[in-house]
Image (cartoon, grey):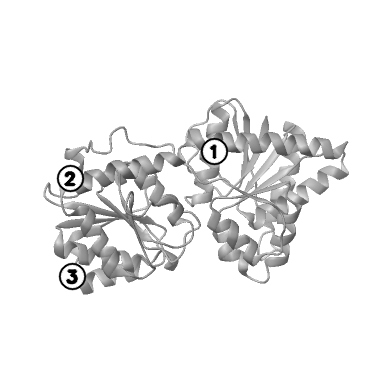
Amino acid sequence: MKIGIVLYPTYGGSGVVATELGKALAMKGHQIHFITYSQPVRLGSFRDNIFYHEVVVTNYPLFEYQPYETELASKMVDVVEHEKLDLLHVHYAIPHASAAFMTQQILKSRGVNIPFITTLHGTDITLVGRDKSFEPVITFCLNQSNAVTAVSESLKQDTYRHFDTEREIKVIPNFINNFSEDPLDIELERRRKYAKDDERIVCHVSNFRKVKRVEDVIRVFHEINKNVKSRLLLIGDGPERYNVEVLCRELKTCDRVMMVGKIRDTANLMSLADLFLLPSQTESFGLAALEAMAVGVPVVSSNTGGIPEVNKHGYSGYLSDVGNIKEMAENGIKILKDDKTLNQFKVQAQEQARQFSLEKILPEYEELYKDVVEKFKEDQL
């Protein structure tokens, strides 16, 4: 099958999932065409069955804001016509779903028919999408999509609550394909660059936006470190970094906190950790938690959105109400207090992550593609 995948090419979860999905589909023999404004960061070196089509954004003096949606639709029309695609799969509703609908209608006027699938990832529904100025467009595009998927049951229900759609939404969760061979096998020499042998490593990865509550990470770690000698690795960067640095100084924990900034291979560093903190205000899925669990790192998190569908309370880690710093710290101490307990949680975290392995999730997408294409062809007869 020839599939066009439209995505944001950045470090965000939707772009990562879409890129990894395309790469996996290409390995199964499907021909994948990525369509976006720059090469996806997770694409890596080019390989068989993968093609990249850049959307060139015109810098025209008339426009204060460049019409990306229009230029994206034009590129999609071009790729579908000349590459003879069977299907378009757009990730993140804004503006990809509306561009896909425009593409579909333009092509229909030229005698070319193609279905499109919209995958909802989170903030396109729970944050940006709830802006009243976007609501009519998103609702329309959801109803016009030939299929809609969401990455969690929580996100599916949020969509039904906030948008007037009766479109069936299929839940296909995010996936992981980067498992450590043995969650208890730690590279001690590399680990010693960040902590002493008698210290635990606590970790957090995010884009440092307010919704991630990174200051809560600092406060939870501060309480953990009072009871269990620890170091904190902060991976990522963003608008809340300055506030985090100020808080570290106030709590006098700067000597135990290392901010490594943005890195591409987060799993490589997370694998050295003993505990992952995710106290977010909301998460449609919690991909960072899943990535941590896959390399054998238990998770202490909030219980919001789709996180409880990923992090199994008392098994792969613990869940607490948003902002409950005291309980999160107590749960972290429970996990870190002795090697036997920690090792048990490490093994269980990876076992839970395997429920979301690529091998289990990929066939769900392939089956959906087949069903959508076949039904679309029948409807055209």
User: Residue 133: which quarter of the image?
Assistant: bottom right
In contact (CB < 8 Å): disc 2 and disc 1: no
> Which residue is nearer to you in this view: 59 or 310?
310
What is the quadrant of the C terminus in the image?
top right
Instruction: Identify the secondary structure beneath mark 1.
Output: helix
Which mark identifies residue 77? none
The label on residue 21 is 1
Residue type at tag 1:
Leu
Residue 61, located in which quarter of the rendered image? bottom right
Rendered view: 221 above or below 83: below
Marking on residue 252: 3
The residue that mark 2 highlights is 340
Determine the residue positioned at 17% across, 54% down.
337
At 32% across and 68% down in the image, what residue appears? 216
| Among numbered discs 2 and 1, the one appearing first in the sequence | 1
Which residue: 56% across, 45% down? 172
